[in-house]
Image: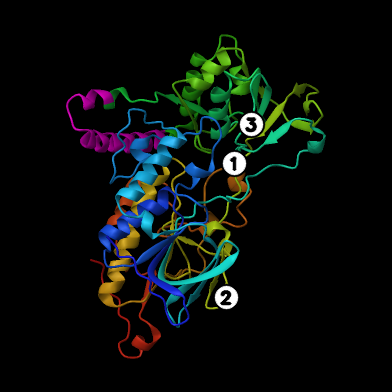
Amino acid sequence: MAPIKENKGDDGIEHFDVLIVGAGLSGIGAAYHLQKRCPKKSYAILEGRGDIGGTWDLFRYPGIRSDSDMYTLGYRFRPWRQAKTIADGPAILSYVKEAAEDYGVTRNIRFNHWVEALSWSSEDACWTVTAVCDGVKKTFTCDFLWMCSGYYRYAEGYTPDFPGRDEFSGDIVHPQHWPENLDYDRKRIVVIGSGATAVTLIPSMVEKAEHITMLQRSPTFMFSMPAESPFAKFLGRFLPSGIVYHIMRWQRIALQQFVFKTARAFPKNAKQSLIREARKRLPEGFNVEKHFTPSYNPWDQRICLVPDDDLYAAIKTGKASVVTDHIEKFTSEGIQLKSGETLKADIIITATGLTLEVLGGASVTVDGKQINFADTLTYKGMMYSDVPNLASVFGYTNASWTLRADLVSDYVCRIINYMDKREYAQATPRNHDPDMTREPYLDFSSGYVKRAENILPKQGEYGPWRHPQDYVKDLMSLRHGALDDGVMEFRQKPAEQEKVPSQSLAAE
């Protein structure tokens, strides 16, 4: 376990070997791996909010749950032991908090430290991190910066500028900031959107509401699966829970990869299959073509999970409905649609998505130069061209977030130990191909991705300048691939370079 050190210099600035930003699912996992594989390294976690959990502490709307199974969303080092593998938010939050406490991570967290600025100095070979705590700016320095701050803006979600919004007499709620005491008993509710949040809200609210409508501009692909795994239950009759967890983890990884690659290879067949399964679960005569037949192919956008057919069951009750149309304007009574229809509502929920950010929106400079991440190339989907000693966690769009977070931890710990052994102070990805084609970081047509293309880094046409969206490829690259690969540039501190020139060494 890494010791807690004050590490204060004469100027009162605390220095750590590693600073982790964010105490959510990724940050707690990063700290565990760092303690285990780099036990001599001092570290701290800077968390902008007042508690552990990130997404799972921020979102409080009814029914909040994972859209990935806990065999893969859970940590590989800490088996998920509950029967329900499509878990609700409070259960996931407890799991993360217990992991942080059990592995001694909690004591290294600095809460309410919102990171605003990151500045790298090649002369000093370190990062200076400026955070705000209770209105006071605090400064830290570190040798390596590990960003686990997520990919969206915590302060606010995305809400379009709906005409007539101020005319509506009821409540307008964004799920990212759910009111603690919102009364929706026997109320008419319209949920704008058909993504994972909307699909979760509707079955969770339908029993108390008078009626709830999912209003969508276009349909979304849905995929049903049991919230509990019959196969895991069967294995649990003969094997310890820890072994069952790891068997199920690999079974789900293999299944995810197979389904994704098959859908991409045979999109027409995959589309027909998903629509056919939705039709089986919806009431007879339901207009599946209009409301559950997307215009795009599967995995051009993320597929929504429907555990235990709960959305379809809500529609079957008659208290939930789906409307596919465009909004003309808000009125005092509800929403007027382009078709001329009016949806009356007491509450409008804008499940309209997230606002993406890079590195939590912090300002980043390298040797005094402001970094615009839209001009950078992503290295292995976790570092950035010409930005030294910084790694960030971004998960998969076709599988669970934590699968990749664990592999990023493997790589970061490897490179820290590699640099220590060779007395390197700086590791920087460098692109030596000026003619490399630059492509969007995410091959996804979802609105929240398209809105952020002007701020997201780019990826190249070949590795290691790509995010492969492939667990097996990442496993080989991040856990076992060469560190000195001709792209990663290693340097000693300037004073040391004068004594011993840097040499290229093969990775262990």
* 370 left or right of 121 in image: right
Q: What type is the residue that disc 2 sits on?
A: Lys
Identify the residue at horizontal 29%, vertical 78% (top origin).
Answer: 423
Lower sequence index among marks 1 and 3: 1
Lower sequence index among marks 1 and 2: 1
Lower sequence index among marks 3 and 2: 3
Q: Split into 4 quadrants, where in the image is the C terminus?
A: bottom left
Residue 66: tell me if it is visible.
no
Asked if the stretch drawn in magenta spans residue 423, the answer is: no
Q: What type is the residue that disc 3 sits on?
A: Leu
**Residue matched to label 1:** 176
* 333 left or right of 31 in image: right
Q: Residues within 10 Å of mark 1 (few under 14, many from 20)?
A: many
Rendered image quadrant of residue 237: top left
**Residue matched to label 3:** 182
Identify the residue at horizontal 33%, vertical 36% (top origin).
Answer: 71
Q: Position of residue 301 (x, y in %)?
A: 54, 38
Nearer the observer, disc 3 or disc 2?
Answer: 3
Rendered image quadrant of residue 290: top right
Q: What type is the residue that disc 1 sits on?
A: Gln
Q: Which residues are magenta?
A: 233-262
Q: Residues within 10 Å of mark 2 (few under 14, many from 20)?
A: few
Q: Position of residue 112 (x, y in %)?
A: 52, 57
427 up-or-down from 27: above or below: below
